[in-house]
Image (cartoon, grey):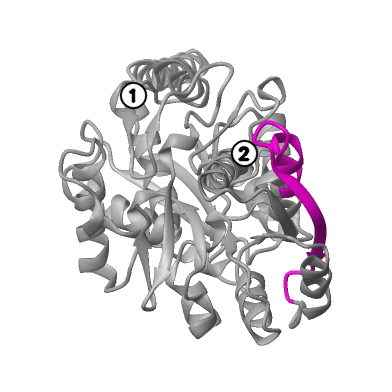
Protein backbone atom coordinates (compact mmCIF):
# COMPACT_ATOMS: atom_id res chain seq x y z
CA UNK A 1 0.00 0.00 0.00
CA UNK A 2 2.82 2.40 0.91
CA UNK A 3 4.55 1.74 -2.41
CA UNK A 4 1.32 2.47 -4.23
CA UNK A 5 0.84 5.78 -2.41
CA UNK A 6 4.41 6.84 -3.13
CA UNK A 7 3.99 5.95 -6.80
CA UNK A 8 0.75 7.95 -7.01
CA UNK A 9 2.32 10.98 -5.32
CA UNK A 10 5.30 10.91 -7.66
CA UNK A 11 3.00 10.67 -10.66
CA UNK A 12 0.95 13.66 -9.46
CA UNK A 13 4.06 15.77 -8.84
CA UNK A 14 5.44 14.91 -12.28
CA UNK A 15 2.13 15.85 -13.88
CA UNK A 16 2.07 19.17 -12.05
CA UNK A 17 5.64 20.00 -13.09
CA UNK A 18 4.91 19.13 -16.71
CA UNK A 19 1.73 21.22 -16.66
CA UNK A 20 3.62 24.19 -15.20
CA UNK A 21 6.33 23.88 -17.83
CA UNK A 22 3.69 23.66 -20.50
CA UNK A 23 1.99 26.83 -19.22
CA UNK A 24 5.27 28.75 -19.01
CA UNK A 25 6.23 27.58 -22.48
CA UNK A 26 2.89 28.77 -23.80
CA UNK A 27 3.32 32.14 -22.16
CA UNK A 28 6.86 32.51 -23.50
CA UNK A 29 5.68 31.52 -26.94
CA UNK A 30 2.83 34.04 -26.81
CA UNK A 31 5.09 36.83 -25.55
CA UNK A 32 7.85 36.10 -28.05
CA UNK A 33 5.36 36.13 -30.91
CA UNK A 34 4.13 39.55 -29.83
CA UNK A 35 0.56 38.38 -29.19
CA UNK A 36 -1.20 40.86 -26.89
CA UNK A 37 -4.86 41.46 -26.13
CA UNK A 38 -4.65 45.27 -26.41
CA UNK A 39 -2.22 48.18 -26.67
CA UNK A 40 -2.56 50.39 -23.59
CA UNK A 41 -1.81 54.10 -24.05
CA UNK A 42 -1.99 56.74 -21.34
CA UNK A 43 -3.16 60.29 -22.12
CA UNK A 44 -3.04 63.15 -19.61
CA UNK A 45 -4.84 66.31 -20.73
CA UNK A 46 -6.34 69.31 -18.94
CA UNK A 47 -10.04 68.48 -19.23
CA UNK A 48 -10.78 70.98 -16.44
CA UNK A 49 -9.09 74.04 -14.93
CA UNK A 50 -7.58 77.11 -16.67
CA UNK A 51 -6.09 74.99 -19.49
CA UNK A 52 -9.39 73.28 -20.35
CA UNK A 53 -9.81 75.23 -23.64
CA UNK A 54 -6.58 73.46 -24.68
CA UNK A 55 -7.19 70.11 -23.05
CA UNK A 56 -10.79 69.45 -24.00
CA UNK A 57 -10.23 69.30 -27.79
CA UNK A 58 -7.11 67.17 -27.18
CA UNK A 59 -9.19 64.84 -25.02
CA UNK A 60 -11.98 64.70 -27.63
CA UNK A 61 -9.57 64.04 -30.50
CA UNK A 62 -8.06 61.15 -28.55
CA UNK A 63 -11.45 59.53 -27.96
CA UNK A 64 -12.42 60.09 -31.60
CA UNK A 65 -9.35 58.27 -32.91
CA UNK A 66 -9.62 55.44 -30.38
CA UNK A 67 -13.21 54.74 -31.47
CA UNK A 68 -12.30 54.97 -35.15
CA UNK A 69 -9.28 52.65 -34.94
CA UNK A 70 -11.12 50.03 -32.91
CA UNK A 71 -14.20 50.14 -35.14
CA UNK A 72 -11.88 49.31 -38.05
CA UNK A 73 -10.46 46.24 -36.27
CA UNK A 74 -7.65 47.79 -34.24
CA UNK A 75 -4.00 47.71 -35.21
CA UNK A 76 -3.14 44.50 -37.04
CA UNK A 77 -6.14 42.98 -35.26
CA UNK A 78 -5.22 44.31 -31.80
CA UNK A 79 -7.46 46.99 -30.22
CA UNK A 80 -6.04 50.07 -28.54
CA UNK A 81 -7.10 51.08 -25.06
CA UNK A 82 -6.65 54.76 -24.21
CA UNK A 83 -6.65 55.51 -20.49
CA UNK A 84 -7.51 59.21 -20.27
CA UNK A 85 -6.64 61.23 -17.17
CA UNK A 86 -7.55 64.83 -16.30
CA UNK A 87 -4.67 66.70 -14.65
CA UNK A 88 -7.06 69.55 -13.77
CA UNK A 89 -4.41 72.02 -15.07
CA UNK A 90 -2.28 71.11 -12.05
CA UNK A 91 1.36 69.99 -12.07
CA UNK A 92 0.80 67.96 -8.90
CA UNK A 93 -2.17 66.13 -10.42
CA UNK A 94 -0.26 65.57 -13.67
CA UNK A 95 2.55 63.95 -11.70
CA UNK A 96 0.15 61.69 -9.81
CA UNK A 97 -1.56 60.56 -13.00
CA UNK A 98 1.72 59.91 -14.80
CA UNK A 99 2.90 57.67 -11.98
CA UNK A 100 -0.42 55.83 -11.92
CA UNK A 101 -0.52 55.24 -15.67
CA UNK A 102 3.08 54.07 -15.86
CA UNK A 103 3.32 51.97 -12.71
CA UNK A 104 -0.23 50.70 -12.21
CA UNK A 105 -1.71 50.65 -15.71
CA UNK A 106 1.61 49.69 -17.40
CA UNK A 107 0.92 51.87 -20.45
CA UNK A 108 3.29 51.79 -23.42
CA UNK A 109 3.44 55.55 -23.83
CA UNK A 110 2.23 58.79 -22.22
CA UNK A 111 0.51 61.52 -24.25
CA UNK A 112 0.26 65.05 -22.83
CA UNK A 113 -0.09 67.21 -21.06
CA UNK A 114 -1.79 70.35 -22.40
CA UNK A 115 0.26 72.92 -20.49
CA UNK A 116 4.01 73.49 -20.42
CA UNK A 117 4.24 73.35 -16.63
CA UNK A 118 2.35 70.08 -16.45
CA UNK A 119 4.35 68.58 -19.31
CA UNK A 120 7.64 69.53 -17.66
CA UNK A 121 6.44 67.83 -14.48
CA UNK A 122 5.61 64.64 -16.39
CA UNK A 123 8.86 64.79 -18.34
CA UNK A 124 10.97 63.92 -15.32
CA UNK A 125 8.87 60.82 -14.63
CA UNK A 126 8.98 59.69 -18.27
CA UNK A 127 12.75 60.04 -18.29
CA UNK A 128 13.22 58.24 -14.99
CA UNK A 129 10.87 55.38 -15.90
CA UNK A 130 12.07 55.25 -19.54
CA UNK A 131 8.61 55.59 -21.03
CA UNK A 132 8.08 57.43 -24.34
CA UNK A 133 6.12 60.66 -23.94
CA UNK A 134 4.59 62.93 -26.58
CA UNK A 135 3.61 66.33 -25.20
CA UNK A 136 0.98 68.80 -26.41
CA UNK A 137 2.78 71.79 -24.87
CA UNK A 138 4.70 74.59 -26.56
CA UNK A 139 7.74 75.24 -24.37
CA UNK A 140 11.04 74.32 -25.99
CA UNK A 141 12.21 73.06 -22.61
CA UNK A 142 9.91 70.05 -22.96
CA UNK A 143 12.30 68.57 -25.55
CA UNK A 144 15.48 70.59 -25.13
CA UNK A 145 18.26 69.90 -24.65
CA UNK A 146 17.64 66.61 -26.46
CA UNK A 147 20.25 64.77 -24.43
CA UNK A 148 18.03 65.41 -21.40
CA UNK A 149 14.84 64.47 -23.27
CA UNK A 150 15.72 61.10 -24.81
CA UNK A 151 12.23 59.71 -24.15
CA UNK A 152 10.27 62.91 -24.77
CA UNK A 153 8.77 64.31 -27.99
CA UNK A 154 6.15 66.96 -28.75
CA UNK A 155 3.84 68.00 -31.58
CA UNK A 156 2.94 71.69 -31.09
CA UNK A 157 5.24 74.21 -32.68
CA UNK A 158 7.75 75.31 -30.05
CA UNK A 159 7.54 78.83 -28.70
CA UNK A 160 10.77 79.48 -30.61
CA UNK A 161 8.96 78.73 -33.89
CA UNK A 162 6.06 80.98 -32.87
CA UNK A 163 8.40 83.82 -31.88
CA UNK A 164 10.28 83.48 -35.17
CA UNK A 165 7.01 83.69 -37.10
CA UNK A 166 5.93 86.78 -35.13
CA UNK A 167 9.28 88.48 -35.69
CA UNK A 168 9.11 87.77 -39.42
CA UNK A 169 5.68 89.42 -39.42
CA UNK A 170 7.01 92.43 -37.47
CA UNK A 171 9.83 92.85 -39.98
CA UNK A 172 7.27 92.79 -42.80
CA UNK A 173 5.25 95.48 -40.98
CA UNK A 174 8.42 97.51 -40.29
CA UNK A 175 7.82 97.37 -36.54
CA UNK A 176 10.99 97.17 -34.45
CA UNK A 177 10.06 98.33 -30.92
CA UNK A 178 7.81 96.05 -28.92
CA UNK A 179 6.39 95.92 -25.44
CA UNK A 180 5.99 92.41 -24.07
CA UNK A 181 3.47 91.31 -21.47
CA UNK A 182 3.52 87.65 -20.52
CA UNK A 183 1.97 85.14 -18.17
CA UNK A 184 4.33 84.40 -15.27
CA UNK A 185 3.85 80.64 -15.81
CA UNK A 186 6.16 78.27 -17.72
CA UNK A 187 4.57 79.00 -21.10
CA UNK A 188 4.83 82.77 -20.76
CA UNK A 189 8.34 82.73 -19.33
CA UNK A 190 9.61 80.44 -22.08
CA UNK A 191 8.12 82.71 -24.75
CA UNK A 192 9.89 85.76 -23.35
CA UNK A 193 13.12 83.80 -23.16
CA UNK A 194 12.86 83.04 -26.88
CA UNK A 195 12.05 86.66 -27.73
CA UNK A 196 15.14 87.82 -25.89
CA UNK A 197 17.26 85.19 -27.63
CA UNK A 198 16.02 85.98 -31.14
CA UNK A 199 15.52 89.75 -30.94
CA UNK A 200 18.98 90.65 -32.24
CA UNK A 201 18.68 88.33 -35.22
CA UNK A 202 15.50 90.10 -36.34
CA UNK A 203 16.49 93.64 -35.25
CA UNK A 204 13.71 93.78 -32.66
CA UNK A 205 14.03 95.96 -29.56
CA UNK A 206 12.14 94.89 -26.42
CA UNK A 207 11.50 98.34 -24.93
CA UNK A 208 9.33 97.04 -22.10
CA UNK A 209 8.79 93.68 -20.38
CA UNK A 210 5.85 93.15 -18.05
CA UNK A 211 4.15 90.08 -16.59
CA UNK A 212 0.91 89.01 -14.95
CA UNK A 213 -0.49 86.03 -13.07
CA UNK A 214 -2.76 83.68 -15.00
CA UNK A 215 -6.00 84.72 -13.29
CA UNK A 216 -5.27 88.45 -12.84
CA UNK A 217 -8.43 90.46 -13.68
CA UNK A 218 -6.67 93.66 -14.80
CA UNK A 219 -3.37 94.52 -16.51
CA UNK A 220 -3.88 98.26 -16.97
CA UNK A 221 -0.78 99.25 -14.97
CA UNK A 222 1.52 97.05 -17.05
CA UNK A 223 0.00 98.26 -20.32
CA UNK A 224 0.39 101.89 -19.30
CA UNK A 225 4.12 101.27 -18.75
CA UNK A 226 4.41 99.62 -22.17
CA UNK A 227 2.71 102.59 -23.83
CA UNK A 228 4.99 105.03 -21.99
CA UNK A 229 8.03 103.12 -23.28
CA UNK A 230 7.08 104.15 -26.85
CA UNK A 231 6.43 100.61 -28.01
CA UNK A 232 5.12 100.23 -31.56
CA UNK A 233 3.24 97.01 -30.79
CA UNK A 234 2.14 94.94 -27.81
CA UNK A 235 3.10 91.26 -27.71
CA UNK A 236 1.07 89.23 -25.22
CA UNK A 237 2.35 85.72 -24.49
CA UNK A 238 -0.01 83.46 -22.59
CA UNK A 239 -3.15 81.36 -22.82
CA UNK A 240 -6.64 82.50 -21.90
CA UNK A 241 -7.97 84.31 -19.98
CA UNK A 242 -4.96 86.67 -19.63
CA UNK A 243 -4.57 87.71 -23.29
CA UNK A 244 -8.30 88.51 -23.53
CA UNK A 245 -7.95 90.78 -20.47
CA UNK A 246 -4.94 92.45 -22.09
CA UNK A 247 -6.92 93.13 -25.29
CA UNK A 248 -9.83 94.62 -23.34
CA UNK A 249 -7.62 96.75 -21.09
CA UNK A 250 -5.63 98.05 -24.07
CA UNK A 251 -8.75 99.26 -25.85
CA UNK A 252 -10.34 100.62 -22.65
CA UNK A 253 -7.20 102.69 -22.01
CA UNK A 254 -7.39 104.11 -25.53
CA UNK A 255 -3.98 102.66 -26.43
CA UNK A 256 -3.89 102.47 -30.21
CA UNK A 257 -1.22 99.85 -30.74
CA UNK A 258 -1.32 96.56 -32.67
CA UNK A 259 -1.78 93.54 -30.41
CA UNK A 260 -0.01 90.32 -31.34
CA UNK A 261 -0.64 87.17 -29.34
CA UNK A 262 0.95 83.76 -29.11
CA UNK A 263 -0.32 80.54 -30.66
CA UNK A 264 -1.73 79.80 -27.21
CA UNK A 265 -4.92 81.76 -28.00
CA UNK A 266 -5.68 80.14 -31.34
CA UNK A 267 -9.28 79.30 -30.48
CA UNK A 268 -12.76 80.80 -30.37
CA UNK A 269 -12.52 81.13 -26.60
CA UNK A 270 -10.20 84.14 -26.94
CA UNK A 271 -12.69 85.94 -29.18
CA UNK A 272 -15.55 85.10 -26.83
CA UNK A 273 -13.67 86.44 -23.80
CA UNK A 274 -12.21 89.53 -25.47
CA UNK A 275 -15.44 90.40 -27.34
CA UNK A 276 -15.04 93.49 -29.56
CA UNK A 277 -11.49 94.03 -28.28
CA UNK A 278 -10.43 90.87 -30.15
CA UNK A 279 -10.92 92.60 -33.49
CA UNK A 280 -7.60 93.08 -35.27
CA UNK A 281 -5.55 90.89 -32.90
CA UNK A 282 -2.92 88.91 -34.83
CA UNK A 283 -1.37 85.54 -33.92
CA UNK A 284 0.85 82.80 -35.37
CA UNK A 285 -1.13 79.58 -35.76
CA UNK A 286 -1.39 76.18 -37.33
CA UNK A 287 -3.69 75.73 -40.31
CA UNK A 288 -6.43 73.76 -38.57
CA UNK A 289 -7.85 77.04 -37.23
CA UNK A 290 -9.43 77.72 -40.64
CA UNK A 291 -9.62 74.49 -42.69
CA UNK A 292 -11.86 76.04 -45.35
CA UNK A 293 -9.14 78.58 -46.17
CA UNK A 294 -6.44 76.01 -46.99
CA UNK A 295 -5.56 75.47 -50.65
CA UNK A 296 -6.42 72.01 -51.99
CA UNK A 297 -2.86 71.51 -53.23
CA UNK A 298 -1.49 72.05 -49.70
CA UNK A 299 0.24 68.87 -48.49
CA UNK A 300 -1.83 68.99 -45.26
CA UNK A 301 -5.18 69.55 -46.96
CA UNK A 302 -6.41 65.93 -46.90
CA UNK A 303 -5.46 65.11 -43.31
CA UNK A 304 -6.79 68.41 -41.96
CA UNK A 305 -10.04 68.21 -43.91
CA UNK A 306 -10.69 64.61 -42.86
CA UNK A 307 -9.95 65.21 -39.18
CA UNK A 308 -11.95 68.45 -39.10
CA UNK A 309 -15.02 66.76 -40.59
CA UNK A 310 -14.83 63.74 -38.28
CA UNK A 311 -14.39 65.96 -35.23
CA UNK A 312 -17.16 68.43 -36.01
CA UNK A 313 -19.55 65.62 -36.97
CA UNK A 314 -19.00 63.95 -33.59
CA UNK A 315 -18.72 66.93 -31.25
CA UNK A 316 -20.52 69.77 -33.10
CA UNK A 317 -17.63 72.10 -32.21
CA UNK A 318 -14.31 73.23 -33.66
CA UNK A 319 -11.25 71.09 -32.89
CA UNK A 320 -8.92 74.15 -32.96
CA UNK A 321 -5.15 73.74 -33.11
CA UNK A 322 -5.23 72.03 -29.74
CA UNK A 323 -7.33 69.23 -31.18
CA UNK A 324 -4.64 68.87 -33.82
CA UNK A 325 -2.01 68.24 -31.12
CA UNK A 326 -4.19 65.51 -29.65
CA UNK A 327 -4.65 64.01 -33.11
CA UNK A 328 -0.97 64.05 -34.03
CA UNK A 329 0.15 62.74 -30.63
CA UNK A 330 -1.97 59.60 -30.91
CA UNK A 331 -1.55 59.06 -34.65
CA UNK A 332 2.24 59.04 -34.28
CA UNK A 333 1.95 56.22 -31.73
CA UNK A 334 -0.51 54.35 -33.96
CA UNK A 335 1.92 54.69 -36.85
CA UNK A 336 4.67 53.21 -34.69
CA UNK A 337 2.46 50.29 -33.58
CA UNK A 338 1.41 49.56 -37.17
CA UNK A 339 5.06 49.31 -38.10
CA UNK A 340 5.90 46.79 -35.40
CA UNK A 341 7.09 49.10 -32.60
CA UNK A 342 5.05 47.54 -29.81
CA UNK A 343 7.09 48.11 -26.65
CA UNK A 344 8.38 51.25 -24.94
CA UNK A 345 11.92 51.11 -26.31
CA UNK A 346 10.92 50.34 -29.90
CA UNK A 347 8.30 53.11 -29.89
CA UNK A 348 10.93 55.60 -28.77
CA UNK A 349 13.33 54.34 -31.43
CA UNK A 350 10.65 54.55 -34.11
CA UNK A 351 9.73 58.14 -33.23
CA UNK A 352 13.34 59.29 -33.27
CA UNK A 353 14.47 57.46 -36.39
CA UNK A 354 11.49 56.77 -38.64
CA UNK A 355 9.27 59.86 -38.51
CA UNK A 356 10.35 61.55 -41.74
CA UNK A 357 8.11 63.85 -43.80
CA UNK A 358 5.21 62.62 -41.67
CA UNK A 359 2.18 64.74 -42.57
CA UNK A 360 0.11 65.66 -39.54
CA UNK A 361 -2.59 68.20 -38.82
CA UNK A 362 -0.06 70.49 -37.12
CA UNK A 363 2.66 70.30 -39.74
CA UNK A 364 5.08 68.01 -41.54
CA UNK A 365 7.25 66.27 -38.93
CA UNK A 366 10.88 65.22 -39.16
CA UNK A 367 12.10 63.89 -35.82
CA UNK A 368 15.81 63.19 -35.39
CA UNK A 369 18.15 62.40 -32.52
CA UNK A 370 18.82 66.15 -32.36
CA UNK A 371 15.24 67.38 -32.79
CA UNK A 372 12.29 65.89 -30.89
CA UNK A 373 9.83 68.50 -32.16
CA UNK A 374 10.46 68.04 -35.86
CA UNK A 375 8.83 71.26 -37.09
CA UNK A 376 9.97 74.65 -38.38
CA UNK A 377 8.51 78.16 -38.31
CA UNK A 378 7.13 77.45 -41.80
CA UNK A 379 4.48 75.23 -40.23
CA UNK A 380 2.86 78.39 -38.85
CA UNK A 381 0.81 81.00 -40.66
CA UNK A 382 -0.50 84.34 -39.39
CA UNK A 383 -4.15 84.90 -38.49
CA UNK A 384 -6.20 87.96 -37.61
CA UNK A 385 -9.58 88.42 -35.96
CA UNK A 386 -11.94 89.94 -38.51
CA UNK A 387 -15.67 90.37 -37.93
CA UNK A 388 -15.47 88.10 -34.91
CA UNK A 389 -13.68 85.22 -36.68
CA UNK A 390 -10.13 84.03 -37.12
CA UNK A 391 -9.04 84.62 -40.72
CA UNK A 392 -5.88 83.65 -42.56
CA UNK A 393 -3.72 86.77 -42.91
CA UNK A 394 -2.38 86.92 -46.43
x 74%, y 52%: residue: 186
- Magenta region: 192-215
User: Could you say where residue 135 lies in the image, as x and y percent from the top left?
Assistant: 55, 43
Q: What secondary structure is marked by label 1?
A: loop
Residue 244 image-quadrant placement? bottom right
* Magenta span contains residue 203: yes
- First-in-chain label (2 vs 1): 2
> Which of the two discs, 2 and 1, sits closer to the camera?
2
Q: Residues within 10 Å of mark 2 (few under 14, many from 20)?
A: many
State the separation of the CA atoms marked 2 and 1.
Answer: 21 Å
Give the side of residue 394 with respect to residue 46, left or right: left
At 32% from the left and 26% from the top, the residue drawn is: 35
Q: Residue at x 84, y 69 (%)?
A: 225
> What residue is pinned by disc 2?
160
Report x, y in % for residue 232: 67, 60
The one of 257 and 141 positioned closer to us in this rendering: 257
For this orientation, the residue located farthest to the bottom is 252
Reply above or below: 186 against 126: below
Residue at horizontal 51 percent and vertical 37 percent from the top: 109
Which numbered dot is residue 357? 1
Q: Using the image, determine if residue 384 lies above or below residue 249.
A: above
Answer whether residue 95 is visible to the viewer in this image: no
Q: Secondary structure at mark 2?
A: helix
The question of residue 217 being in magenta is answered with: no
Residue 12 at least partly seen:
yes
Amino acid sequence: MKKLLVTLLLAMMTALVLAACSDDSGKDKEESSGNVSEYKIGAIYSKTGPNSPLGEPEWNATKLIEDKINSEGGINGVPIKIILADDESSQEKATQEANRLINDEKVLVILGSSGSGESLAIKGIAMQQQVPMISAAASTHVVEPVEDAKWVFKTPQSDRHAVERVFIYLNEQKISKIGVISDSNAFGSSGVEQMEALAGEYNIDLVAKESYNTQDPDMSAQLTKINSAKAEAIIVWGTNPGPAVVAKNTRDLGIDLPIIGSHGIANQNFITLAEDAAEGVVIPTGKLLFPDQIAEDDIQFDVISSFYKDYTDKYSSEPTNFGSYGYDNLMLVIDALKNGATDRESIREYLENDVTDWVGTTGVFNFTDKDHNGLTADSLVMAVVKDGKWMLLK
